[in-house]
Structures are given as C-alpha cells and as structure tokens.
Amino acid sequence: MTCETSAGTLAGLRVIDLSRVLGGPYCTQILADHGADVIKVEPPAGDETRAWGPPFLGGDAAYFLGVNRNKRSIALDLSTTGGREVLLRMLGSADVLIENFRIGTLERWGLGAEMLASRFPRLVHCRISGFGAEGPHGGDPGYDIIIQAMSGLIRATGSESSGPMRIGVPLVDMATGLYAAVGILMALSKRERCGSGQFLETTLYDSALAIMHPHAANFFVHGRAPELSGNDHPNLSPYTVFSTATGPIFVGVGNDGSFARLCREIGRADLTQDPRFARNQDRVANREALCAALAEVFADQDAGELCTRLVAAGVPAGPVRGIDEALADPHTVIRGGVIEQDWYRGVASPIRLSRDPATLRHLPPRRSEHGAELLAEFGYGADEIEALTRQGVVGAAAPWACTMLHDVVWLERLRHDAHITAWGRPRGPLNVKVASRGLWKAMSRVPTLSSPFLLGFDEIERVLDRVVKGADGYPPYNIERCERRDGQPERLRITLAVAGFTRDQLDVTIEENQLVIRGRQSDDKVRQYIHRGIAARHFQRTFVLAEGMQVLGADLRNGLLSVDLARPEPERIIKTIAINEHE
C-alpha cells in the first residue's frame, strides 16, 4: 500500500456510506483503499466510535481512525427534510449506498429499499443489520459480542478452567464487513451485465454462523456441540500453545508427515512408534499424554530458535507475540504492512494487486471536514451552504483537537526513580496538574509570561507558579528525563509536535549549549495543517542546555520530532527554555 496518487481498481465508483461503528466502515474502507470515492455521511454528533477511547488523537478515538481512512466526511441530519433532500441529490450520482440503520428507520424517513430502487435503478443498496428483518429476532439491534454469544462462538472459545470466553477482536463485525464488500462487488459485476442494481443484506448473525467452521460442520456429522478445548484444535493434535524458556510458541501439526518431522527435529523420533500417536485420530484421542511429552522437551529451549528450526524442518510453528512485536517485525516492514503519512499510522490493505495497489489518498477525516466542499460539488451555492449550516441540516467541520495539546501540563516530580514530563506550549494561561509518587496534586492558573522560564529538575515547585503555555498555534513540546542507570549517561528526550513538517524541513543543531530546532515549510503545506494547531510557516524553538549535552539522534514519527540528548554527569540538564518569535 502506497501514499502515492493512483487511480485504483475501483476509481470512478462513488459510495455513499451512511454506516457507523465497525462493520460498515470496515467494508467501505476496503473499497476506499482501492480507489472508490467514499463519502461518509455522519449524524450531526458524528460516528459514535469517535468517542470510543482512550486512546485519542486529534480528538478522535483510535477505534475510529483505524477504519475510516480514504473517506470524505459530511455531517447530515437525515431526520430533517433538508437533510434527506441533500442525500437524495448525492444518490443521483452514486453507485453504492451502504447503511446499518435499525430496520424500519429509512422506511420511516421515506427512503426505503423499494423507493430507492425505483428512483435509482442502477444503485446497489447494501444493508448491514444485526439479524435481518425476518424471524423471531428480526429488527433487533445487533452487537458483535452479543452475536458471538448467540452464534456459538463464545461457547467454542476458552478452556474448562476459564469457561466460555469472547474472542479478543470484533471478529463478527469485521467478517460482516468483508461479506458486505464481497456482496457489493458481486452486485456491481451483475450490474455490468444487466444494467440494474439491487438490494443486498448482510447480517452479523448470518456472518457469525458462516465462520463457525469447523464446529458447524462437525455438528452436522456427529450431532455434538463443541467442548471447550482452550488453544487445542478440535480435529488435530498436536495443535496448541507450548511454553519454552523464553516465551510461548504455537505448534500446529496438520498431518502424520508433519508429526514425524517434528519428532525427528526435537530428538523424539520414538513418539512416532508409539501406537497412541501413530495417526492423527490417535493423537486426538491421546492429546493430553502427547502434549505432556512435547512440553517436557520444549520447556528449556529458546522460543525464537526453536521456531526457526521447526519451520526449517517443515513444521508449522511460531512465537506467541503481542501486536507491538508483530508490527515491528522485519517481515511486516518489508511487506509494507504499516502505512504512515504525517500523523497517521495504520495497517495497510492486505489486498496486493500487481497493477493497481491500494493507496492512502485521504487521512481519516474530522467530522464534516469536507461538508462545504461536498455540497459545492453537488451543486449547492455559497448562500445555500450557509443556510443549510445555519439551520443545522449540515454540521460544521469539527476543529482539530490534538490530544497532546490539552490545556493540562503534567509534571511528575523527580524523586528517586521517578521521572519528569512536561507538556506545554509557550505563552498564555493554563491549568497545571502535578502528580508524583506521593499522589499530591496542585492546580493553578497563571498569566502569560513573556520572559524565559525555569524548568530545572530541582525547581519543580517554582514551576508550579510560573509555567506558561500558549494557545496561539505554536508547536507544543514534551520533556522527559530518563532514569540514570549504572554506567549509562543521563538522558533527555525532547519531543516537539511538528505536524505537517517533513524531516528535511526540520533542522536540529546545538549552538553554544543551546539545542535549536528550526522548521520551514511552504504556504500550501501550512494551509493543510492550520486547522491542526500548527499555523506558523517557520518556527524556531531553543532549549538552553547544561554544558556537555550531545545529540544522540532525532526521529520524526506521527508528526512528533523526538530529539535524544545525553551527557555523562547527572547534574541538572535543562536550565531555561527560551522562546523565539515565530513568523
């Protein structure tokens, strides 16, 4: 997945996305990544997942940011006649409508499936719902975890000791989104041949049943519900998690040949001669004894080395890792599994087309960020746009509210193994909140100071009365003092928010015991980021350091420039912070 401009396989396809939360947005992000023009129509308050945090970035939760890139947003009150009129005008040029309103909502607004099919015969109308319209649960709202429970997924997950467990990711919502994307592409393919669109529906309940393999297939044959088996596979053995000296691994043996290779590689070829383990069905019947024998061999081995050996021998195996390790894996990096642009980081599209790769064209939008732009695109004049906004039919664009720019400065007092962190911007009044290991807090409001102020580690209590922070768009900073370890130099990390700047537009130098960070960018770039709190074309930030400080390195990631400094002596590192004029 690239950040370059590319038409994409679905270029020219317009999708009106009325969906919220996860299943629908996940579906439309798949289409958007491959070139579809997705217009996200949100309620006036916005998609509720914008508030599903922490963590937050720019005022929106990571949950929202993860499934809403490559879309344009407009907030529209569809409960009003004016809002519905705007939607109908948008549908006039649309290929796809996707929505997940509760059954009957669109019909109550006069926008039911039959009406839409009559007025827009080429429209592919996709509805995502919990249970569909028919049946005892028809029309009921659907939630991923509730459907996990009702479909048998939870009863098939967990161990005897844990009891039934929910799956750790919203698998039902995401599977429903995938099925919806496939269904939309099927309907569009049919439209190419016959000229007409159609209505299609995917439900969380149907999707959950569809992914209940092999448990549903097993039940159709032997008539028994699955037992809780923890990490074990109901049909295969050994196929589970084992402990090693350096962490857990998963070994998955799918046939007799793999089992023989496993036994040879770990020096237990004798296990293949044991009649209890001769065939897969024997191993399943004697799972406990087999796993005990393997666990004894694995217990004192290194997880990474063992997995490397097993894979080389043709045995499926891998370490059990966290998402942080998976995203940092060299394989993920080489495959381009993480895409980054400015402040945004996300998992790239897994659909790798040779001629038309997925692209990142739009970062996740603020609520109604493109409202005026879209209205103009659909033929509304400036006076009409102003009237619709004034009447509340169309929501105004939400301001960018960078989480790291909150009006609270945190100072953690340097006591023993504690460290100090200060978030803030120069100039202006602020609230100061102080927390230490003793959990003491103080709140104060201070006036603007035009002169440099002290931020020495031994002067925190004075800082309580004099720290200042501005609200005029200058880049904020963070200062963190790391613990001094035996034989290691004392370190300092200064992090500056520089959203909109690239690394080559930033200069980091030490000049006469001053760390000087300069930024310069074009007017066009500034206009893109002015709503995100960085308004200056050029800036210079100066940190006055104690003697002997050296720059270890500087790294730009997610709109944050981190500069690491060090010196051998554990004296006070920062003396003052001087604020230079911005242009």
Image: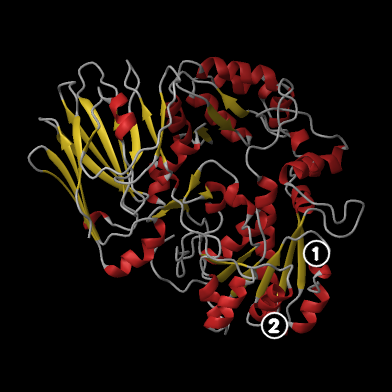
Instruction: Give residue 437's position: percent from left, percent from top.
Output: 42, 18
The quadrant where residue 67 appears: bottom right
Query: What x and y, as percent, mark residue 223?
Result: 88, 37
* Residue 299 in picture, x, y percent from top left: 50, 16
Q: Is residue 522 above or below residue 321?
A: below
Q: Tell me how the rendering is colored.
A: secondary structure
Looking at the picture, does residue 93 appear above or below residue 493? Answer: below
Q: Which mark is residue 344?
A: none
Q: Residues within 10 Å of mark 1 (few under 14, many from 20)?
A: few
Check disc 2 and report the residue beneath it. Answer: 193
Q: Secondary structure at mark 1?
A: helix
Disc 2 to disc 1, C-alpha distance: 32 Å
x, y percent for residue 458: 25, 22
Q: Which residue is mark 1?
A: 105
Tell me whether circle 2 and circle 1 mark residues in contact (CB < 8 Å). no
Going from N to C along the chain, the mark reached first, 2 or 1, is: 1
- Residue under the point 58% across and 69% down: 39
Residue at 40% x, 46% y: name it: 405
Extreme residue in the right direction: 136
Q: Is residue 405 left or right of residue 229?
A: left
Q: Amino acid at mark 2?
A: Arg
Determine crowd level at label 2: few under 14, some 14-19, many 20+ residues with C-alpha closer than 10 A. few
Q: Quadrant of the N terminus?
A: bottom left
Q: Between label 2 and label 1, give the one nearer the viewer.
A: 1
Residue 544's place in the image compared with 395, above or below, is above
